[in-house]
Image (spheres, helix red, strand yellow):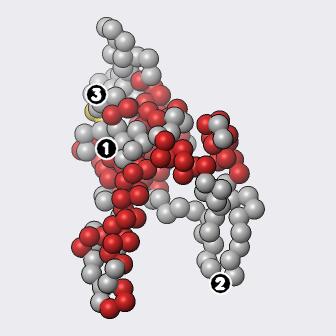
Amino acid sequence: MSSGAVAGLGAAYGAGAPVYPGVRQTGRVDISARSDYAVRAMLALAAGQDGQDGPGQEATPVSVDRLAQAQDLPVKFLEAIVADLRRAGLVASRRGARGGYLLARPADQIGVGDIIRAVDGPLAEVRGLRPHDTAYPGEAQHLPALWVATRAALRAVLDGTSLDQLRHGAWPAEVTELLRQPDAWESR
């Protein structure tokens, strides 16, 4: 399957997804609005800086209003998100009439997992605990290992994909392989 075919699978998400009796069908991955908005804002910043970092050229800062407009996001909510991204060292701010925000480092050096952690904390928690800090009695004693493996899988995808790769759909091999799985785009 070509990378174009993999990218085209997104349009089919949810179409014809099987229905399992007695199972709640949410049709979504549980990603917070904060994480979604943060990644989208970072993508808009990366797009605004494309080709502007040449010799003698400085990237143009982007205001929160422009970021919000570019991605149809609520300005006030985005202001708080951008503040978190700045505190995490992922964006830098410039003051003044032409002020705004810039990526703090090149888009190919920012992992999607870094963005999510900046606004939402750890990638995986179980009842507020880190997966390796859970413990269960009896038959459930091995469950922490499954939670740790789940966290490792999230890390592999989110930390293994840079903002630049996401922006261009140039997926790492591991992500491409996951996207090619026949049921990858099905809700269940």
Quickly name the residue at label 1. Answer: 85
Q: Nearer the viewer, mark 1 or mark 2?
A: 2
Residue at the far top in the pictured view: 56
Which amino acid, by three-letter code, is at mark 2?
Answer: Gly
Whether pointer 2 and pointer 3 mark residues with C-beta atoms closer than 8 Å, the reply is no
Residue 23 point in image, percent of width and height: 62, 79
Q: Can I make out residue 83 in this image?
A: no
Q: Residue at x 38, y 32 (%)?
A: 107
Residue bearing the label numbered 3: 94
> Any mark on residue 154, and which?
none
Give the amino acid type for the residue marked by disc 1 in the picture. Leu
Q: Amino acid at mark 3?
A: Arg
Can the viewer see residue 55 in this picture? yes
Label 1 SS: helix
**Viewer-nearest of labels 2 and 3?**
2
Are the residues tagged 1 and 3 within 8 Å (C-beta)? Answer: no
Relative image position of residue 100 (x, y in whole percent) = 35, 30
3D distance between C-alphas at marks 2 and 3: 53 Å
**Of callouts 1 and 2, which one flags the residue occurring earlier in the amino acid sequence?**
2
Nearest to N terminus: mark 2 or mark 3: 2
Label 3: how many Cα within 10 Å (few below 14, some 14–19, many 20+): some
Q: Please name whichever residue, 133 or 38, is drawn nearer the observer in this view of the structure.
A: 133
Quadrant including the N terminus: top right
Residue corresponding to mark 2: 22
Alpha-carbon distance for marks 1 and 3?
14 Å
Q: Is residue 76 left or right of residue 8?
A: left
Quarter the C terminus occupies: bottom right
**Distance (Cα) linking label 1 and label 2:** 40 Å
Q: Who is closer to the viewer here, 96 or 172?
A: 172
